[in-house]
Image: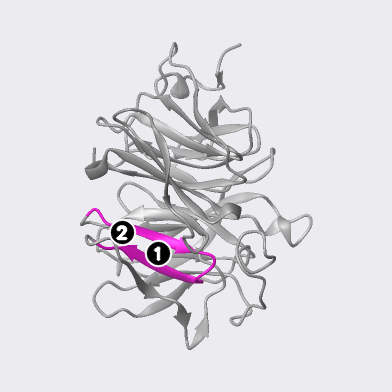
Amino acid sequence: MSDYDILDERFAALIIGHAQLERLWTGCRWAEGPIYVPAAKSVLWSDIPNDRLMRLDETDASVSVFESPCGYHNGHALDAAGRVVACEHGGRRISRLEADGRWTMLVDRHEGKRLNSPNDVVVKSDRSIWFSDPTYGIDSHYEGHAAPSEIGASQLYRLDASSGELTAVVTDRVRPNGLAFSPDETILYVADTGATHVPGLPKAIYAYDIEPDGQSIGAARTFAICDAGFFDGFLVDRDGNLWTSSADSVRVHAPDGVLIGRILVPEIVSNLCFGGPKRNRLYITAQTSLYAIYVNNHPPGW
């Protein structure tokens, strides 16, 4: 059986027909937040319930525990200096891995109240850090520490690189989750997994136009609806296509929102990232495992 479901010829140009999906490692309880670290030739990803950060060494395909406990990490990003920026469910904060191996806390409060449990994060070209903050890490003791929300809302924030000011940018979502910018950073895409708490809520990715100031956003418009589980984490390639998680596959949506194809995965997909020396290897976290497949595309800027 093919690993692909081609729904539009635009998808055919993004894949390598004979490239197969590879299961690289299994043994997680819930795998999440993959990030490729070029300087280390490694992929890091979270095993949230086991409170550990895993590492795949690309040079020999070995897998090891990078750090445990780790504060129940979820999503990760790289900043302009190549440092790992992390969302911590347990610490209820955004932290950064410094060159000397220490984790530095960047922010843990908004207007004096503790964050819920930062979930996913991106670093914009102006070095600002944008992250979602739903309640999944405080809803129970499974992915963090059960606690009431001090903020009383799930929002998406912008942390200014110069001033350190934290601003609530997206306030109209129930449970903002995955996020990404279009290649030219004029659109912010945000997944809402609020149907976990509000039955019947659309399982969708929303698009927000970025205002000329580069900091504020316009009104939301629905970009795509998921009919298999949820859109969780996702990424944007250099052509503006969205590669997103779902319950049965990695789904690829063209910039116009049309679903153009799927990469079939035998577990629930949570997140993904580009990696490898040519950034053309798609690393996929799915439930208990780390998968990978070579594709015919690359991240923005490559």
Q: Is residue 267 left or right of residue 76?
A: right
Q: Which residue is mark 2?
A: 124
C-beta proximity under 8 Å, tags 1 and 2: yes
At mark 1, the secondary structure is strand
**Quadrant showing the N terminus:** top right
**Quadrant showing the C terminus:** top left
Magenta-drawn segment? 82-98
Give above or below for 66 relative to 269.
Answer: below
Give above or below for 34 relative to 79.
Answer: above
At mark 2, the secondary structure is loop
Query: What residue type is disc 2 on?
Result: Lys
Marks counted in the figure total 2
Q: Is residue 43 left or right of residue 117?
A: left
Q: Which residue is mark 1?
A: 130
Residue 182 in percent (x, y) is at 37, 48
Classify mark 1: residues with Cα within 10 Å, few (<14), some (14-19) or many (20+): many
Could you tell me how far apart the alpha carbons at marks 1 and 2 are, in whole angstroms? Answer: 7 Å
